[in-house]
Amino acid sequence: MDAPLFPLFADLNGRAVLVVGGGAVAGRKVEALLHAGARPRVGAPQLSPALRELAEAGRIDWLPGLFDTRWLAEDVWLVIAATDEPVVNRAVAGAAEAQRLFVNVVDDAQLSRFHVPAMVERGALQIAVSSGGAAPMVARHVRRRLEELFDDAWGRLTELAGRHRPAIRAHFPDTGARRRFFDRLLDGPVLDLLRRHRQADAELALQQAMAGEPPAAAGSVVLVGAGSGDPGLLTLAGLRALNQADVILHDRLVSAEVLQLARRDAERIEVGKSARGHSTGQEHIHALMLEHARAGRRVVRLKGGDAFVFGRGGEELQFLRAHGVPYEVVPGITAALACAASTGIPLTHRDHAQQLRLVTAHCRDSLDTLDWPALAAPRQTLVFYMGVAALAQIQARLLDAGLPAATPFALVENGSRTDQRVVSGTLRQLAGAAGLHAVRSPALLILGDVAGLADELHWFGDAPLPATSRTSSPSAKTPPPTLADAA
Ligand code: SAH
């Protein structure tokens, strides 16, 4: 096996670098060189429009014509060959080597004397990944993982530590002591404070750590919205929280695929609640959050959809605030958005709906307190959560309040998951349709003219099922209006 490469970060500020080639690949190299403050000198018979612009702006020098060894002038520090002609690239590599100039030949590890790594940049913090040319795709993949792992807060941390470096060195002249201080600092709250853009508090925490004061209790709770089941609908911030969690308290609605993304050794506790059936009481959930946070653990409270949409996230924050437990909130894709997307139903539409209402139909109480005349108003979209058991009442009350019987609906079961089913029809058919297709929770009811677009715009899974069996021939996409609808 070849010897490994020697990694190095070069200071090219103000230094000339020769780039041979005038196309898109050369353009990307030139961008990277300009970012590092270098003075690119581009040799090529012609320049791409982007490079031409840079030349006209005086940001690069252009050496017109075919490759000439005189381009390797005395003040050139590095050479990059980026033409699409292997013969030219080889000539450049040979000439550079003869003058002991480091040369990179794009996409040719053999001819290259230095490689350009895949990079993650967070302010002054630069993370470089290389496979030594063996497998650039693997390096790129690792880079992507690092992008997720190291957010902007690391850049701010690097800046902060850099600014206080003289003080820190003066305070801890001994290397060992300094290293232990940094371990303490990075385990403490500084990074989290920077993540929440609380710069002043972060400075304070750094000063406290220097004074040797114990950091504030490290335990905390992150309220994370997991989206509606498809792991692709989790946010990067949510993924990061799952990667850092010691304990995950999750709802029943959170899919196994999402839970799989969490740190392997995190303790997973299901505190699911089903509409009836078994449930973990809210007080018990509060007690668990408190117990684990007080023990110094990083708790993720993981909820289906979004924690602030019918998710009791507000109550949990009030409880945490009352008990002095630090918290963060990461939003999730709520069922209304996920189901709308996966059924092709735009929730607002210039021709059909100028407002959107998210409604809970959880129990008789909530049904009684809803403002039905307002819900029956025209040109809006209604989305009912937790309504499967109450569809007959919803239908009756809306008809009573004057919503036209021909108003389209879409009932979405297991929305955005592989087992998604959609039933579409009109308000008059609602309860019957749900019974006919035995629609089960979790299901979402979307009501309003936009729901009618599902038949035309659906793209995910099967086409919407018709509301009545009379029209259930497989070829029928849109159920024809029933007699009742026509009346
Ligand atoms: N906080 C969650 C909602 C919790 S209430 C969110 O923001 O999505 C639970 C209700 O959400 C269910 O009864 C159902 O109406 C709806 N729901 C959640 N996931 C769903 C899914 N994948 N498909 C359809 N409805 C869903």
Image (cartoon, rainbow, N blue to C red):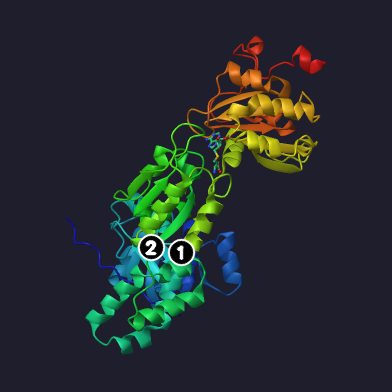
**Disc number placed over residue 219 in the picture, else none:** 2
Q: Is residue 5 above or below residue 431?
A: below
Residue beneath the point at 29% across and 65% down: 113
Give the residue at the far left of this rendering: 1
Identity of the residue drawn at 55% across and 62% down:
47
In the displayed structure, 266 sits above or below 175; it is above
Q: Secondary structure at mark 1?
A: loop
Q: Is residue 427 left or right of residue 20?
A: right
In the image: residue 244, left or right of residue 302: left
Q: Is residue 15 visible?
A: no
Residue shown at the point (30%, 77%) measured from the top left: 181
Residue visible at 77% across and 41% down? Answer: 350
Residue sitting nearer the eye, 247 or 52? 247
Q: Secondary structure at mark 2?
A: loop
Q: CA distance from mark 2 to mark 1?
A: 8 Å
Q: Position of residue 300 (x, y in %)?
A: 42, 53
Residue carrying label 1: 326
The amino acid type found where label 2 is placed reads Gly
Q: Looking at this rendering, what residue extends furthest in the right direction?
A: 487
Residue 174: horizontal and vertical position, in percent?
A: 24, 85
The picture places residue 173, in percent across and down from the top left corner, at 27, 88
Q: Depth check: 104 or 391 in front?
A: 391
Q: Disc 1 marks which amino acid?
A: Pro
The C terminus lies in which quarter of the figure? Answer: top right
Cβ of mark 2 under 8 Å from ligand 1: the answer is no
Dot placed on the residue nearer the N-terminal end, 2 or 1? 2
Most foreground residue, 132 or 20: 132
